Image: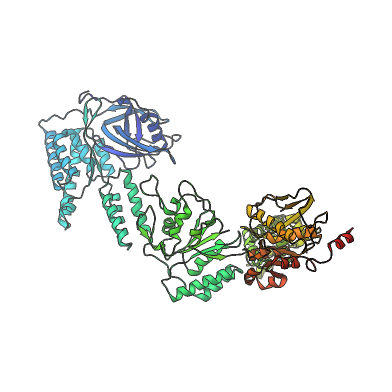
Amino acid sequence: MERGTMRLPERLPLLLLAGEEVLLPGSSLRVGVDSARNLQLVQGRLLRGNSVRSTIIGVVPGPGPSGGGDPDQQLPRLHRIGTAGIAVQIVGSNWPKPHYTLLITGLCRFNILEVVKEKPFPVAKVEQLDHLEEYADGTGELTDLSQEFYKYAVQLVEMLDMSVPVVAKLRQLLDSLPKDTLPDIVASIIRTSANEKLQILDAVGLEERFKKTIPLLVRQIEGLKLLQKTRKSTPSDEKRIVTIRSIRKNNQIPGGQLHFNGLEQEDDDDGDDIVMLEKKIKSTNMPEQAMKVCMKELKRLKKMPQSMPEFALTRNYLELMAELPWNKSTTDQLDLHAARVLLDSDHYAMQKLKRRVLEYLAVRQLKNNLKGPILCFVGPPGVGKTSVGRSIAKTLGREFYRIALGGVCDQSDIRGHRRTYVGSMPGRIVNGLKTVGVSNPVFLLDEIDKLGKSLQGDPAAALLEVLDPEQNHSFTDHYLNVPFDLSQVLFIATANTTATIPPALLDRMELIQVPGYIQEEKMEIAHRHLIPKQLELHGLTSQEIQIQHEATEGIISRYTREAGVRSLERKICAICRAVAVKVAECQHKVTESNCGPVSEKVKESVPEETKEESIDDVTDLALPPEMPIVIDRHALKDILGPPIYEMEVSQRLSQPGVAIGLAWTPLGGEIMFVEASRMEGEGQLTLTGQLGDVMKESAHLAISWLRSNAKKYHLTNAAGSFDLLDNTDIHLHFPAGAVTKDGPSAGVTIVTCLASLFSGHLVRSDVAMTGEITLRGLVLPVGGIKDKVLAAHRAGLKRVILPKRNEKDLEEIPANMREDLDFVTAFCLDEVLNAAFEGGFPAESRHGILDSKL
């Protein structure tokens, strides 16, 4: 197909441009497609086209920023003249929503005769206006205009820097391209407004087109001359009024039509943004190494075409570097008295934790460049670990940022992705710094004991550098690839247990145990914080509801059994909801009886001098007589139902072979019953209750020690033999069989339980115990003493037997609790048995007790 024989189809699908975009014949335009009509055109026509004629589309200046609008809406009024073009490149994706980018080359003008179809995309009957015919030199006004235009175009190009390859290429094209294509091509390169481009598009005649483009060309030349006079800079900078993005090679389209893809005009706004970005980077005072990397990337960005995918990636990287707080920080509020008052008002108890925070403030006041410590609050849920971290930030006057680590199993969440990956982004540490905007915030690493591990790496190992005071001054995120100083960040981690934290990570943190609350502390927390908070959330006042102390005590002892106060708060919330129903019903009755939202009768009864009082004051006079609603022990059963926890300890210890142990769980301390029975058999020991290997070993240790000391304690089997397993099977059971149990601290409880079984003595019903045993009868120390003692106190027990070497842990027990409990510290099992049985062990003859029962 020779030049001049290219003919458009009679019907063309129309692509509606958005905003101020205009495509001229002979030039190229990159178009973003995200509107419904244009998406239908790309998917239904361009991506399925199988011939040249099927890929030719009509490009029409758009009606607005929607670029085609919704297909269900009416088609907007179209511009009469458009440009036929070919989509030479289509890129895009369907995630998270469909979006395409087209590179369209303009061919020729056409006139819209009639729109024959509007849905799913418009199709119009068109008339070809210019036929891509070779321009013939001749005489007359057209020839003069052509020569004048060519002269100005050459002058403009020669004013640019000819050492730039694209400028030299453009100079060659001015001589090789047909003269009738020059006005459209040059107009697409020089700085013109959308309205001026529309006028050129509407200029169907070649003579009219030359007349409209020559003034634009002259204006560009004059502007360049003025710039050269006023700017004193290098020659290359003086000639940079127009930056030519790219010159593409001549393409041979089907039919033999020689075609020039065109030049893309630089977006001035983008150029200004890059200049502003450079200024912003230079004003950050970032370290020399980071500045060097930014300048290198900025230099690459200036030379990079905007159409390249790497352009957006590099720009996002530089914007992040400019937004990071390299040298921005807040000043600590070093007022110890104010900090103490604030901590006491926000949180009740927690004396050890508050003391550590005040110590940090005091040292910070004496030495201002103290590195931020790495604190780890370990304790059961609901005791206020997260809220304490927020209060510490408030105390210091620092920004606060919480990072939830529960379930994180990819190290890139901590260290970020390398920029070579698609969709790369910085890690949570760097992203948090960007969010808070300062280099010394308080970072709360919540649930650090629940980090996962997968094929994407170990995030706990990635935290090693973050949480090492000797290394985090040069923390390197994979996305940044330059060091960032984290030494001034105050890191606070929270965990329910240290068992699942890797030892290397645990070694980098200072552990602060946050135990559960005793009943008195829960009472104070409920009336100081929880009840006022729930009243406000439910729109209630103290004039409408009063929760008595006996009711709060009943909720704590009979409806909740926890270390923290979350369940307590939920029960208070349930009470407030029930009262809110009553209050709303009463207000509705008052409203109906007085025929209005505010009782007119009440208003009339108010003296004239008080008429100006607020409506609320008048409404208060109309409260029903049953207000306030008082919540006592009797109301608890009506609202919360029957008590969940009843004191059953004495009932369960009414037979020999039962003892109470103390266990530690991530949810706090718990009491644990151990039951034993014997029957005729072959000397087997059966253990049930989902026990771990350590607890099974403790049971075997206990039975071995008792067999070796059977004569000393007068322990015999049913046949009267001191060989306790002779023709006897023993079954040990740990109730709550659905809960997995393990650990060595049940050793003393198992010994006591079996001693009760073989002696016939009852273990005291008010005694609980914990401790590890050895084969020689020694009692070794265990952990979680405070949580275990709290559990015993909640259960109403009076005596607690502990290992002798755990005596130091009793200092953490509140004084009022120490007064309520009788602590017995034991060095060996002899002391444990003497404290666990009434009157010591062995007390009276086993046979005498059994005879009296019979």
What x and y, as percent, mark residue 613?
63, 67
Q: From what the image shows, is residue 111 above or below residue 535? A: above
Query: Which of the colour schemes (rainbow, by chain, secondary structure, one colour) is used?
Result: rainbow
Q: Nearer the viewer, residue 19 or 813?
A: 813
Asked if one can make out residue 482 in the rendered structure from this viewpoint, the answer is yes
Image quadrant where residue 632 sits: bottom right
What x and y, as percent, mark residue 753?
75, 59
Identity of the residue drawn at 31% across and 53% down: 273
Query: Could you tell me how many numbered marks the image carries?
Result: 0
Horizontal placement of 714 versus 746: left or right? right
Identity of the residue drawn at 49% across and 47% down: 454
Asked if one can make out residue 628 in the rendered structure from this viewpoint, the answer is no
Q: Nearer the viewer, residue 259 or 699?
A: 699
What x and y, as percent, mark residue 579?
70, 58
Q: From what the image shows, is residue 23 above or below residue 455? A: above
Image quadrant where residue 117 sits: top left
Image quadrant where residue 38 sits: top left
Q: Which quadrant is the C terminus positioned in?
A: bottom right
Horizontal placement of 757 versus 487: left or right? right
Q: Which quadrant is the N terminus positioned in?
A: top left
Identity of the residue furthest to the left in this view: 139
Q: Nearer the viewer, residue 446 or 342?
A: 446
Q: Nearer the viewer, residue 247 or 241?
A: 247
What x and y, as percent, mark residue 89?
31, 35
Horizontal placement of 308 versus 399: left or right? left
Identity of the residue drawn at 82% across and 54% down: 718
Q: From what the image shows, is residue 36 above or below residue 596? A: above
